[in-house]
Every structure is written in C-alpha cells, then in structure tokens.
Image (tube, rainbow, N blue to C red):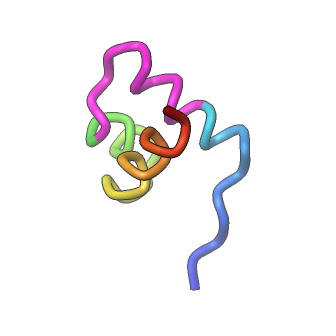
Amino acid sequence: MAKPLSVDLRERIVGDVNNGVSRRGAASRFRVAASTAVRLKARFE
C-alpha cells in the first residue's frame, strides 16, 4: 500500500496547478501519479 501524501506536498501540487502548470506536469514534478494530481485539484476546488 502506498504512503499517504503530506499536507505540504498536497498544497504544493495544487499550488502548481493553480499557477498554470498542467496537472500531469505537476504530477511529474512531484513524482506522483497523474490521477493523484487530478483528484487533489478537484478536492481543493
């Protein structure tokens, strides 16, 4: 089972997406699955 992501990492991923980086780009930068970035962004909206 995968480890949970820290709150800090979640906020940084969402912050990147809010600043114009694609969800896939942010996922790649922080080495998480693209689906994770998509779900996080949807959750923070």
Foreground: 26 or 40?
40
Magenta span contains residue 18: yes
| Residue at x-position 71% and y-position 38% | 8
Q: Position of residue 3 (x, y in %)?
A: 65, 71
Q: Position of residue 42 (x, y in %)?
A: 43, 42
Q: Could you say which quadrant of the image residue 28 lies in? A: top left
Q: Which residues are magenta?
A: 12-23
Q: Position of residue 5 (x, y in %)?
A: 64, 57
Q: Is residue 23 left or right of residue 11?
A: left
In the picture shown, does residue 21 fall above or below 6? above
Q: Position of residue 1 (x, y in %)?
A: 58, 86
Residue sitting at the far bottom: 1
Residue sitting at the far right: 7
In the picture shown, does residue 33 fall above or below 8? below
Residue sitting at the far top: 19
| Residue at x-position 32% and y-position 23% | 21
Q: Could you say which quadrant of the image residue 17 lies in? A: top left
Q: Is residue 1 left or right of residue 22?
A: right
Q: Main secondary structure of the magenta part?
A: helix
| Residue at x-position 60% and y-position 42% | 10
Residue sitting at the far front: 45
Magenta span contains residue 17: yes
Foreground: 40 or 34?
40
Q: How many marks?
A: 0
